[in-house]
Amino acid sequence: MKMFVALAVFLTVNSAFASTRLVLNWKPEAEFGGFYAALLSGAYEKEGLKVEILPGGVGTPAVQMVASGQAEYGISSADEVVLSQDRGADVVGLYAVYQTNPHGFMFSAEKKWTKVSEVLEAPGLLAVQKGLPYFLFLEKTVGKARAKVVPYLGGISQIAENPQLVQQCFVTSEPILAEKKGLKVKTVLVAEAGFNPYTTLVVVRRSFAEKNKEKVAAFKRAIDSGWKQYLANPEEANRRMHVLNPSMDMETLSKSAEIQKTLIETPETKTAGMGSMTDARWATIASQIQTTGLVKKVKPSAEYQWK
């Protein structure tokens, strides 16, 4: 009888670890490499987890899916967490892959700009998504763009057609695609101007984390292991992501994986550990979002993250 009771307990405990969903906010690319490395290496299984990675795409509501319980974990950014909580969503940051935000501006290599202020002070055309927090923050703190602002259409089609145009980008992606097309480009990070929210940020419902502390801690250990493996050797995970997203060739994935290393590993992570977050950084991010007028009141830093 005791044996059957023990077996029932074992099955009950492990059923809680049976299916865990991680929803991405974009297609499989290098910025998600560590999550796939954890899958391929068995890091999830070693922690008693069965993880399903759900690829995203244009408009994937990853945060909303986590908040509504459609997925246990999702990929977001610190500024989106602040905005989502202001709107009542029960989501908190768990693990910050990118310590330095990869959002930037891309332009012709002929230009000598090294600062965001120089980009905004220049005439011409600037392709951006105007309503995003980073651009609202820059308009408030650096100044209105002198260039004519036009909608960003995605990819590199606009700068390929007009090399004098400046466009928003992720420094780990569009510049590589531009160079493959024979364009000579340079970039400057938005973080240079002080707006630097954590991104490729794993989020979870606080209510879920409070009820499943062991499971959440196990997931965090697994993705940390995956990211360490990916940074050391990205090839296997890149092959898997190429199969899932054929538009990303192996050369592009490899270059992107190399470029992002300095955005993931910083002097702070050398002591605090990869994926770590600080109260001071969250306080800064929340305050900056407040200056844009997108939120009226900010919360204590501890409410934006799960430790």
Image (cartoon, rainbow, N blue to C red):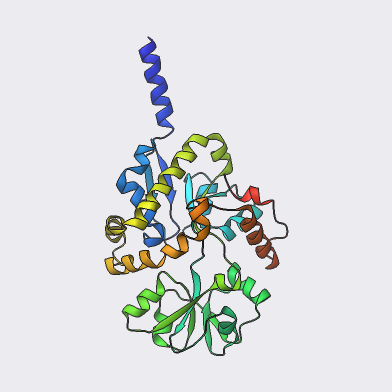
Residue 50: x and y in percent read 37, 39
Q: Is residue 306 visible?
A: yes
The answer to whether residue 298 is left or right of residue 229 is right
Residue closest to the far top: 1
Residue 147 x/y as whole percent: 57, 87
**Location of residue 87 with respect to 184 vertically, above or below:** above
| Quarter of the rendering containing residue 281 | bottom right
- Residue at image position (46%, 60%) is 264
Q: Quadrant of residue 161?
A: bottom left
Which image quadrant: the C terminus?
top right
Q: Is residue 131 visible?
A: no
Residue extending farthest right: 297
Q: Is residue 214 above or below residue 4?
A: below
The answer to which quarter of the image holds residue 244 is: bottom left
Q: Position of residue 49 (x, y in %)?
A: 39, 38
Q: Nearer the viewer, residue 294 or 189?
A: 189
Which residue sits at x=57%, y=88%? Answer: 122
- Position of residue 157 in the picture relative to residue 148 (left or right): left
Above or below residue 116? Residue 264 is above
Quarter of the picture holding the N terminus: top left
- Kindly identify the residue that appears in the image at 39 percent across and 20 percent down: 8
Placement of 230 over or under 172, stated as above or below: above
Residue at image location 47% in from the left, 64% down from the top: 263
* Residue 88: x %, y % from top left: 64, 50
